[in-house]
Amino acid sequence: MKILFAGLFHETHCFVSDRTPLGDFRRERGDEIFRRRGDGSQIDGFLEVAGRAGWTVLPTASYTAMPSGIVTADVFESFWSDVAPIAEAAARSGVDGIYLSLHGAMVTEAIEDVEGELLARLRSIGGLRQTPIFGVFDLHANFTGAMARHANGLVCYRENPHIDARVSAIRAAELLERCLASGVVPRMVRLNPPIVWPPTGTGTADSPMRDLEALARRTEVEDPELWAVNVVAGFSFADVEDAGVSFSVVTTGREEPARSAHE
């Protein structure tokens, strides 16, 4: 199996005056990404499953930066210029899946929903329209309609403080492995209630996140069509339309039962 990989990770604070330029990003391209093995990151978790499964990983690029202000427009376009040629070549030669390492709350001067834009651009490449897209993202993401529409299996962290980035990446990669082995391709359904919590109110050792996470795990057990249930705390310091709490599921079932599970 050939799996295309890309990583884009930034938590963007829209209410500060500074900008985050390209020079603030750690940029890894191609085989440089394999050096992340053993570092305890999202990427490390994915590479562990890829090695165990015997996948051929097609690495494109990974851009990461510390939380900071709105990202300059050239960052995403630079990232896409690294990703697109490899993705297009993979689409022509044949690729079995795509795995993304994301944050989920990145904003640039030009794009409000960066992760949704990345997914849409991947889907616009001929040969990738039906390719299963899985990946991992941060609990403090602002999960958008475009992310749900274009992805098959995005999985978020379950812990805040974030002690489970690697474990969550493994969970997402194992869902991709399940998809490829079974031939069953799930889809995503999301629900965004009109709720915004400050980051200080999203610790998973306390309510409401503790109770919501426990309910999500029970729901996964009770309904075999639900491969994963995400409780996404959101990032309230992002000045975007979809900021706030959301719930999303990876499901093989119909949309209405999936929405009922949210409720």
Image (cartoon, helix red, strand yellow):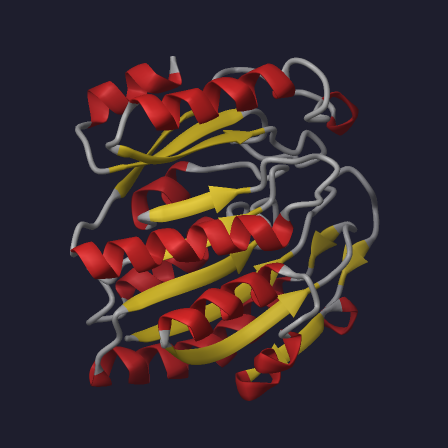
Camera-nearest residue between 170 and 250: 170
- Considering the image in quadrants, where does the C terminus appear? top left
Camera-nearest residue between 142 and 256: 256
Say if residue 196 shows up in the picture.
Answer: no
Camera-nearest residue between 27 and 43: 43
| Occupied quadrant, residue 63 | bottom right
Labels in figure, total: 0
Point 79% across, 51% down: residue = 68
Point 58% across, 41% down: residue = 157
Camera-nearest residue between 150 and 163: 163
Residue 179 at x, y percent in the picture: 25, 54
Q: Is residue 29 above or below residue 232?
A: below
Point 57% across, 51% down: residue = 167
Point 62% across, 74% down: residue = 37
Residue 210 at x, y percent in the picture: 63, 20
Report the side of 53 relative to 185 (left or right).
Answer: right
| Occupied quadrant, residue 19 | bottom right
Q: Is residue 137 above or below residue 94?
A: above
Residue 188 at x, y percent in the picture: 32, 38
Say if residue 176 shows up in the picture.
Answer: yes
